[in-house]
Image (spheres, rainbow, N blue to C red):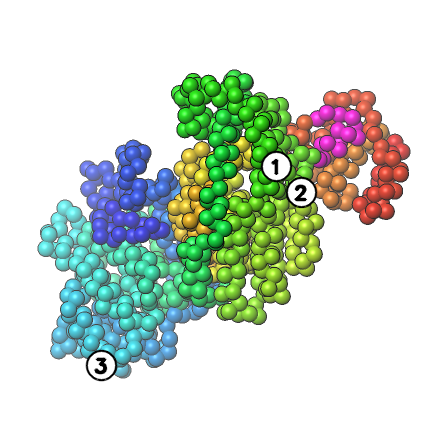
Amino acid sequence: MRKAHPTLVNPTAGGITGLAYALAQSEHRFHVRNIDLSAEDLTDSALWRRVIAEPSTDRGDVVKLWGGGRYAQTITPMLFSRIAETSRHTGSATAPALLYYMPSLALMDCRYPGYREVNTTNVLETGLITEGVYVILGGAGTVGRVITRLLQQRYQAKVIWLGRRPESDSKLQAQLNAFATPPYYVQADANDLASLSTALQTIQQQYPHINGAMFSGIVFDFDNSIAHTSEAQFNQILTVKTQGVVNFYQTFAPLVSDFLVYFSSGQAFSFSGAAQLSAYAAGITFADSFVHAAAQLTSATPPVGAINWGFWQSSLEEWPLDYAINSLSDEQGFTALERFTALLRQGVCRQLLCLNASEPVRAMMPVPLQQQIRLADGLTQSKTGFAEAVQALAQQPKPELATILNNPDQAKLLNLLARAVLARIEVLNSASLHRDALYQRWWQQTLTMLDQAGLIHYEQPGYRLTELGQHACLNAWPTWQTEKAYFINNAETRALALLLDDCLTALPAVLTGQVPATDVLFPNGSTEKVAGIYQKNQRVDYFNAVLADSAEAFIQQRLAVNSNRPLRILEIGAGTGGTTAMVLNRLSPYYDNIEQYAYTDISKAFLHHGQQHYGQHPFMRYALLNIEQAPDTQDFVLGHYDVVIAANVLHATGDIRSVLSHAKALLNQGGVLLLNEISDTNWLSHLTFGLLKGWWLYQDAELRMSGSPGLTPNAWRQQLLSLGFRAVYFPAESAHRLGQQIIAATSDGLVTCTPQKSVATCVESVATTTIKPNTVQAQDNAAQTIQSAIKQALSEALKAPLTSLENHIPFSDYGLDSILGVGFIKQVNQVLKLNMNTAIIFDYSTIEQLTDYIVKTYPGITPTAEPDTELARRFFNGELGVGEVLDKALLSRF
């Protein structure tokens, strides 16, 4: 079994993967499970149950069980305009389309589609250079000769061949003399390291500088099934793709400047036939594993990659085949080499599959749902500058960290909270909990944490108190009422203690569904109660400062590369702006370079907060952004931002890989994602935001910490690397025990896009849309009055003009959420003298539906109009415009 990206690759047994393909496809007596495991998971007892449960496959499809997830290979189609044009001139109307693919891993789930069309218009046309020096091991082979000819014709390149035959061999002489300028030939055996080293010394006497080296060594046999091969024959084919591959890297990697490319084949994948090619498939999968391992070396220069070729037409002409195989033309293959070397040198792609696939083969390829990917614009950052800066932050933590770590207050608070929680829930019968499954998850995690604290014995479905727990039930609540004063009177913990006290007090009502948790955390739709816990205390400020330091380090490197290009920053879930304040303060020396700081959130309530506190900066922009949806469907430009920040927000989503992919899509090539995230499960978050439904919406529990939406540092690293981030850093690693972590990850520039509808489709959609007529008739004065009151309250909650509100549009489409909904329903209740719960906006989710509900449920109500004197005061204070005053005045006349 071979390990796969993004964990460190050990290619030693990589050939077993290809051998499993051959076994599954040729020996149907066997039930083959081809599973890739990672060493760090081997101590997990659950892993072996999953191995046994894994179904067999008749083609040997490889599956990776890693970090709690199940992954399968996916193949990303890459569309190159030049290649597409070339393939149109094949002269055959039925010729299969030429396809280029980027193999990768995807979690085995329909939520993680793997088919992505790649627009590479920002990629250089070629990674080859004029008058470059290129070594081809196996250059006398058919593919090597084709590439040599085109290198000489198009780039006036100096080409060196390495081969086992002596230069005096007559056939070799004929091949060399077929060129106007024969390649420089050096005899060497790829399987002999000393032979290759001697060859290199010979080459350097003639060509001291080598730009690129290509490994085209191969021993091939079309009849090499497991049942019929001999050990000698198997080893002869295998050795050149194992020992030869390693020897070539050890010899040329230290001296080649631009790239090292291995020529591989489609037999590295289960869809390609391996039944008669057992040794070759084993050698190819080892070689590909080795390439990935070499590419992960921190000292990996030059970049190392592999092209998995399909059959070349030129090669097939030399084989006596009695059947047709779809194949590549010389032009197609060489164009792929040009583009791949460009991608490789840019650090975008290190493996490419190039073949003319027949329809049956394409049907077997792991190419699920359609997406599009393009390469974002970007600048070439220093490879070491930012890395050194963030690593220095980790190695030299700020002086105040020691004081924070040694402060006993947090431990004392957590101890008090555990006992107080037990006292509050003991008055409840678990059966009386709100039937929402999300609260059941909260309940189960609470019992787990109480068990860990030694207060109960958790025995599903119930629990029993320990002696310590019995004592806590008698004294914990009175003790909390006394001890909380210490934390409330301490400036460092005041905001958190007040919020915790409110949550503890309301806990029984929240769990039984009597009071929405949003009413407790965001009373009257205000964000002020939670704002205080995100700033102005040492612990929170420390992590925000490290994030701001990381942002500044990146921007310094970015400006060093190009100080004329404006900076663009986007913050996801900016909320109350605790992180924003620290970042803006740190970046003040660079204000003249900042074109835009996008302050985004899913709730308009937080955007209003941001406008009030940071509106003085001309570069600030405010916009709704739901990171669980594709950003380009929300009018955001993909690949546009240098820095994307998300503080305590990404964990509160259903699918972490999806939101990370969306965040990455906002970044340009080389841009950085900065995250401030929880690093453990504790009472502080569980008792506050853990009461919100969003906390428990995650659907990928196998990737999260137990009983929490958070991810461990290792899980963050795994997911970020697997999605194409080049490097992941933890600049606050020494402070992780405080419950937070800072993550910095740089993007490779490949961004996922949503396919756009055609104009015809859009027109058709508009033409066939019907709008439900308003059910509230104009002659119904009571209904009209209620509707006007709802509209007015909605206008004020959203800070939107009345004229922009439509009766049939869902509240959620306007950005009205459970937070803004509190203030909205409070005003409707006040004006109409009602007592509706905020949750009514989810059951009756438009102006029209809510009006109809109130008319039918509360007949005969009359609204309380706002006095004209109050209207005048608000008008002269600038709180209302003329149109809003007229609307309110008209309302008061009914």
Per the model, the C-alpha gap separating discs 3 and 2 is 71 Å
Q: Earlier in the sequence, mark 1 or mark 2?
A: 1
Figure quadrant of residue 825? top right
Residue visible at 34% across and 80% down in the picture: 131
* Mark 1 → mark 2, Cα distance in angstroms: 29 Å
Residue that mark 3 sits on: 205
Q: Name the residue under label 1.
A: 489
Q: Position of residue 49 (x, y in %)?
A: 29, 33
Query: Helix or strand or loop: what does disc 2 sit on?
Result: helix
Q: Which of marks 1 and 2 is in front?
A: 1
**Viewer-side residue, 385 vs 41:** 385
Mark 3 or mark 1: which is in front? 1
Residue 458 left/right relative to 683: left
Residue 761 can be seen, yes or no: no
Counting from the top left corner in percent of width and height, residue 75 is at 38, 51
Residue 314 lies left or right of residue 237; in this view the side is right
- Give the Cα separation between the discs numbered 3 and 1: 79 Å
Query: In this picture, which residue range is highlighted in magenta?
Result: 823-836
| SS type, badge 3 | helix
C-beta proximity under 8 Å, tags 3 and 2:
no
- Check the image and report above or below for 444 versus 139: above
> Disc 2 marks which residue?
605
Neighbourhood count class around disc 3 (C-alpha, 10 Å): few under 14, some 14–19, many 20 upward: few
Is-magenta flag for residue 517? no
Which image quadrant: the C terminus?
Answer: top right
Left or right: where 246 falls relative to 663: left
Of residues 155 and 841, the one drawn nearer to the viewer in this rendering: 841
User: 368 or 516, which lies in front?
Assistant: 516
Of callouts 3 and 1, which one flags the residue occurring earlier in the amino acid sequence? 3
